[in-house]
Amino acid sequence: MYGADWCGDCLRSKAYLDRRGVSYAYVNLEQTPEAADIVLARNNGLKRIPVIVFGDDTHLTEPSDEALGAKLDELKGQAPIEPRFEVVNRADEGRFDLLRAGELVGFAAYHMNDNTAVVTHVETLAQHRGQGFGGKLMEGLLDILEQSDGSILPLCPFAARHLRDHPRPAIGA
């Protein structure tokens, strides 16, 4: 759920989910302003909250309690769908981002030296640590480098350990 603590609809939807005993992750847009891009993408450019994203990758924006209840009832008993992961090379910012269902989960900072990505730092955001996302990020960035015939120089201890444990000779790791 993407929202803000000053938003009455957000507070109402949170209370409804709590009453129904539904577990959810709350992304406070005041504390995580970069998540506003997800809200805008889900709402075709409109700044409306809350945006509640479900396991089937559908979402509701500013739902009434009735609409939210109907969606929860529809999903009841269905096996949860694993959210999509994507690694995006943001070369202009010098980082690879790991996105889970569009939400930033972690990143790897780097700079290029010829065709070699010099990885200086890998970080999983605090709320996502301990779930193996750092490894997903590394595998995704290695896939990108492999596709572009690039190589990697891991200065970050996490990146170096990952490469030691999961060697990829094709990219010089």
Image (cartoon, helix red, strand yellow):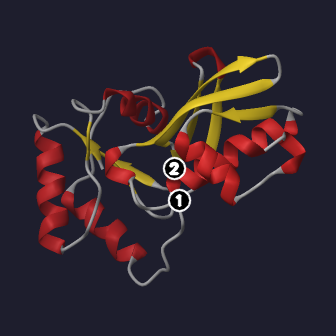
Q: How crowded is the residue under tag 1: few (<14 C-alpha within 10 Å), some, or many (20+)? A: some
Vertical placement of residue 77 versus 7, above or below: below
Residue 23 place in picture, x, y as percent = 26, 67
Where residue 86 appears, as percent x and y from the top left, is: 62, 46
- Disc 2 vs disc 1: Cβ atoms closer than 8 Å? yes
Secondary structure type for disc 2: loop
Q: Is residue 140 left or right of residue 109?
A: right
In the shown orientation, is residue 131 left or right of residue 31?
right
Give the Cα separation between the discs numbered 2 and 1.
Answer: 5 Å
Q: Which residue is mark 1?
A: 83
Q: Which label number is shown at residue 101?
A: 2
The image position of residue 162, as x and y in percent, is 63, 52
Q: Please give the name of the residue rendered at 14% of the width and 37% of the height, measured from the top-left corner.
A: 7
**First-in-chain label (2 vs 1):** 1
Q: Is residue 133 visible?
A: yes
Name which residue lies at 69% across and 41% down: 141
Q: Is 123 left, or right, of 165 in this rendering?
A: left
Identified by mark 2, the residue type is Ala
Question: Does residue 18 appear left or right of residue 61 in this picture?
Answer: left
